[in-house]
Amino acid sequence: MTGKLIGVGLGPGAPDLITLRSARAIEAAKVIAYPALPGTESFARRIAAVHISENTHEIVMEIPMTTARGPAQAAYDQGAARIAEALDLGQDVVVLCEGDPFFYGSFMYLHARLAGRYEVEVVPGVTSVSAAAARAGQPLTARNDVLTTVPAPLDDDTIRQRIESADSFAILKVGRHLARIRALLGALGLADSATYVERATLADERILPLSDAPDPAPYFSMILVTKGADPWLTPPS
Amino acid sequence: MTGKLIGVGLGPGAPDLITLRSARAIEAAKVIAYPALPGTESFARRIAAVHISENTHEIVMEIPMTTARGPAQAAYDQGAARIAEALDLGQDVVVLCEGDPFFYGSFMYLHARLAGRYEVEVVPGVTSVSAAAARAGQPLTARNDVLTTVPAPLDDDTIRQRIESADSFAILKVGRHLARIRALLGALGLADSATYVERATLADERILPLSDAPDPAPYFSMILVTKGADPWLTPPS
């Protein structure tokens, strides 16, 4: 009997925004695995820390942050091989995933490598988009609204086309793209309704009008825009 | 001192997909409020049941399911007034919200009525989209993918335009629109890659190829399509 691969979403960062199911899976785990930037503490492990037992075996996958395909792919290959070793020994392996495992999550790279060979369970988590909206007090979508999430590294034309066809949108991974995105939203007349949210739910969270956002922004930042407030949201006067 | 309005996301339906923060808020609550369809058990209350203390005061808001504006608005007006009464007495009120409060959630109608007058806290929750993807084993978005959520009641032209500009999409609130959406996805060549997910994470969950989906579908159903798998997800051969 081989073990089961369990990808658990941890939510946006605050340790108590983890689900009961993810917390229990981590507490019961004999083997956990998680990514870390080389030489730094793993953000995923930090969110989950209180649920990790002292005797749990930890597989750390050092994933270089690079736009080149090779090094990150090799790191995931190696991580998947180490996880497979534990699964072959009959151990379940719980993989810690910031946010939601299938929403811009690194877990997908392990899933692609292992799902054909092993039983897999995915425990969904609270996304950074839900967290940012909650913290900003800004509703995302009601009734028949369309919500779109758009990564900031895309080119201007693509971003413009994507957000023009949405009622609400979140621009993710803002980082060094902040000035360009701010100019684009300004040209579309959307800058005044845009909210900048950095590290939502963490101790150093910042929520600002887009005009006051830092440039460059950190990687864990996003811009939220709700274009058309659903008329149902307004109580009749 | 008036009380605080706390909207807590409960996640998609399985009771252990609630966050620790939401569970603790409910356990500590002296007053809770939640919507229910007239004459039926509240789905939100059922998800949260194990965390509700015996002595907690419960404000039930009966919300008629109708496309007409008047009756539902009146029900939210009345619910908001009852909640405001408790807040004015200095009590915090915890409002139970299926899924995430700001993602197609009824909490937004209370938020619109009360946020200007009272302190508000929103606790995000796991969305039905994250849950459906997790249960279907179908990744949503990696790297620079665009994700769009589209309500099925929109007209064909609007839906087509919205999903053509997304890499992955979820069509929500399928219900009686199933046959129309299925025909539309077929015409776009997307029917074979579409997964139908009904009542994700509940005991009577069903996950089927779109071709086998029931018509009409229940309200709590969605269709997931991942159009372009990110090439990084494929390990090099």
Image: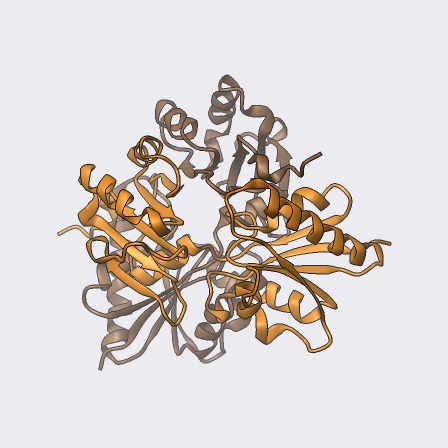
Chain colours: A orange, B brown
Residue at point 48% right, 41% down? B219
Left or right of residue B211: residue A11? left
Q: Is residue B225 above or below residue A207?
A: above
Residue at point 39% right, 62% down? A199
Q: Is residue B41 visible?
A: no
Q: Is residue A87 above or below residue B60?
A: above
Q: Is residue B82 above or below residue A63?
A: below
Left or right of residue B33: residue A11? right
Q: Is residue A3 visible?
A: yes
Where in the figure is residue A167, as x and y percent of width and height?
A: 30, 39
Where in the figure is residue B161, as x and y percent of width and height?
A: 37, 25
Instruction: Identify which residue, B133 or A97, lies in the foreground.
Output: A97
Instruction: Identify which residue, A164 or A123, lies in the foreground.
Output: A164
Where in the figure is residue B177, as x and y percent of width and height?
A: 46, 30
Residue A196, quarter of the rendered image? bottom left
Instruction: Identify which residue, A62 or A122, lies in the foreground.
Output: A62
**Image quadrant in which the N terminus of chain A is located:** bottom right
Left or right of residue B183: residue A230? left
Q: Residue furthest top?
A: B187
Q: Residue furthest right?
A: A1
Left or right of residue A132: residue A11? right
Residue at point 30% right, 49% down? A178
Number of marks in picture:
0
Residue B114, quarter of the rendered image? bottom left
Where in the figure is residue B11, as x and y percent of width and height?
A: 50, 57
